[in-house]
Image (tube, helix red, strand yellow):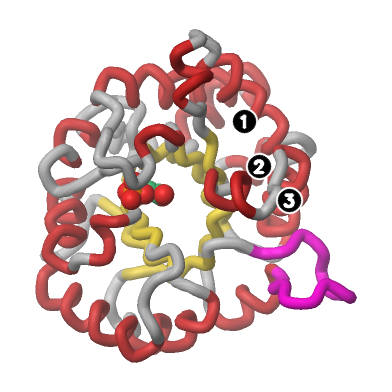
Amino acid sequence: MNQRYRKTIIAGNWKMNKTPSETRALIDELKTLINRVKWCDIVLCVPFVNIPAAIKATKGFRVAIAAQNMHYEKSGAYTGEISAAMLAELGVKYVIIGHSERRQYFGETDTTVNLKVRAALEAGLRPIVCVGESLTQREQGVTLEQIRMQVKIALGGVEGTSVKRVVIAYEPIWAIGTGKTATADQAEEVCGWIRDCIREIYGARVARAVTIQYGGSMNAGNAHELLSKLDVDGGLIGGASLKAAEFAAIVNAANQ
Ligand code: PGA
């Protein structure tokens, strides 16, 4: 992470876990464990129905609440969907876009990711855009091509002035929920490459300001090493974000 240019963001992706009452309990526990946060922003990405409880429970505690998905249209006949404006009105600040689980199980594509990124920005939300290669792509040596394509399509039509509000999360699919973390050097290589791709489109000043996270089996044991890399500006943490002590340890590692 390069604190001269950008803030570290540690985001917990709770996925489909916790009820509203369990949300309150986990946040209350976190409050007792997280030290005074100076160097990093904390984000909790909770299921839609837990958003009001999470916002209430984090009042006065420097934590932003995020959604895990949204629809790209403003309103309309999209049964079961949630718009960016609905989230913004609740006080949501960030939204995960294009997580690999959504791409794999819910048919999201680079094109829908782009539509969602633009709609999120327009509604004043900060998108956390997930990109990452599969194991086959890594083994075939096409990781960087895959990432470049995902980043360029996700940012299509996004102005330079808005792109600083976008967070990119590099999440190698083979590392998600598997306990197999990318090495710090692998994470740095791809996060640096993502910054190169952004530089190519928007120039060096913008590229320097964009927060790029690593995600995939990040935990209290490996967070410090991953976060010590220059282009790794935070983490998107799944499993380990559901255990208060573990998540607090990652936040405290980022806050050093
Ligand atoms: P994990 O998930 O930390 O459990 O690997 C990360 C993610 O899916 O965002």
User: Is 56 located above or below residue 145 in the figure?
Assistant: below
Res. 246 visible in picture: yes
Q: Which mark is residue 118?
A: 3
Badge 2 density bin: few <14, some 14–19, many ≥20, Cα 10 Å = few
Q: Which mark is residue 224?
A: none
Distance (Cα) linking label 3 and label 2? 13 Å
What residue is pinned by disc 2? Answer: 161
What residue is pinned by disc 1? Answer: 151
Name the element at disc 2: helix
Disc 1 residue type (three-letter): Val
Disc 2 residue type (three-letter): Thr
Magenta stretch?
70-83
Residue at left 24%, top 25%? 184
Disc 3 residue type (three-letter): Arg
Mark 2 in CB contact with mark 1 (< 8 angstroms): no
Res. 236 visible in picture: no
Q: Main secondary structure of the magenta part?
A: loop
